[in-house]
Amino acid sequence: MARFLLLLLALAPWAVAQQRYPLRELNVEGAKIFDPERIKDEAGLQVGQQVTESDFQDAIARLGAAGVFESLEYRFGPKDGGYSLTLVVQEVEQVFRVRLMNFDTPEEELLAALREEIPLFRQEVPATGRMVDRIGDFLQKRWMAEGHDSKVMGQLLPIDDGDLAMVFQPEQRLQTISFVEFQGSEAISPIELQRIFNPKAMGEPYTEARLRQLLHYNVRPMFEERGLMAVEFCPCTTRPDESSLGLIVTVKVDQGEQYSYGTVRRPEVPAVSPEKLDAMFDFKSGASVNMTRVTATLGELDERLRRLGYLKSETLVDKKVNPNELTVDLTFETTLGPQYKFRRLEIEGLDILAEPVVRKRWGMQPGDPYNSSYPQTFLDRVEADGMFEGLAKTEARTKIDETTKSVDVTLIFRGEGPPKQYVPEAQRPRGPF
């Protein structure tokens, strides 16, 4: 009898959650982008409705199917002889504006249809996931109902103001680029621009937004290397390519005036001497801007710091363009992060005679700042010196202990047959190295 009573007590909370009681209160927490009332509507629950906990789980499933939440939870408790329910949502933070292009139906009419057909649809959506799939499916069905059989594509593309947008458009109306020609460029010959840009652009689906994106990443740096910070591309024109189904695109270049360095503030990095920093960040006020060199200098400093054990160092530049003065102010800032130390060396693939030779040659000692480039440099030297017979491949693996900020290195020597044998220096083949 006692065991039966204990079982009933253990099952009591579960049994209560399965009994139907009226929903007295429904709240939403965490909603910043989406209207809480629309979230409640999509959840499918109404205050006064008779519910059990399984209804709460169904509501969470319906919200999850919308594809706009990172996570969903619920809390419930007693209230006035019924339930109080709170839906806790975490929205996808990064969303992009929806653009509908090249359809027969006006964009506003399509957007209105999407709002009516798709739960929680807004004109800002995540870049991937269920919401994007539902938009694409709806547009595809509507496009086919209008008598078309081509595919509707959805892509994250830059739009006219430079911001990224989720662009949906029919593939059949998206012609490809067959050739790009340039006009108006003096600092760089149009022929040189065509030689460099066309291999990257030919065959790409043509929209002006996509063309501008390609120009931004592949052509603009060439002008900024010459101090032409205000260069502009387009208006662009297209004409059919008689030899293909693609388009010949003409890009008009307005290269603008040449800019020079204004105020330059180099980073303060205690791990590197001021003299070395001055030599690296030698951007003289009044000299022509070269953004390619600026970017290379950021990488050069970070690589130097990683050789000193600062594996997570990051150097950034704040660039302020002054159109009236035709200058660019640069402010560099470095975040060092923790310094990592070398802890131990492990070796795989060598026999008992060869392994001590490698350990003796290895220069980094326990407790030294960990040089991120040293293991591969060491292995390259071993291979170049021909230290081992039948050596097919070497590899360096690292294991980082974030608690102690230390690094273990494993050197791996691979080849056919047994562990590699050491070749004395006098017996090594001599070559041009």
Image (spheres, rainbow, N blue to C red):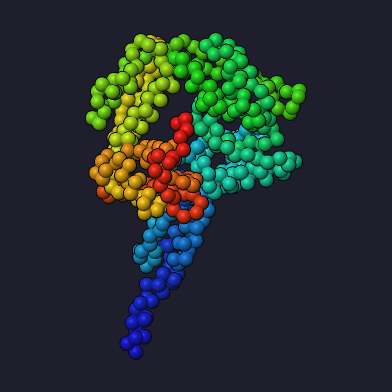
- Total numbered labels: 0
Q: Quadrant of residue 315?
A: top left
The vertical placement of 410 against 425, above or below, is below
> In the rendered image, which quarter contains the C terminus?
top left
Taking the image as shown, residue 163 lies to the left or right of residue 14, namely right
Asked whether 404 or 78 is in front, the reply is 404
* Residue at screen point 59% across, 23% down: 197
Residue, far bottom: 1
Residue 322 percent location from the top left of the image: 38, 15
Taking the image as shown, residue 175 lies to the left or right of residue 282, namely right
* Residue at screen point 24% across, 25% down: 273
* Residue at screen point 46% across, 10% down: 257
> In the rendered image, which quarter contains the N terminus?
bottom left
* Residue at screen point 59% across, 26% down: 211
Residue 186 in sight in this render: yes
Asked whether 278 or 421 is in front, the reply is 421
Residue 109 in sight in this render: no
Residue 287 percent location from the top left of the image: 37, 11
The vertical placement of 55 against 376, above or below, is below
The vertical placement of 366 against 45, above or below, is above
Residue 98 percent location from the top left of the image: 55, 37
Q: Quadrant of residue 243?
A: top right
Residue 264 percent location from the top left of the image: 32, 18
Q: Quadrant of residue 190?
A: top right
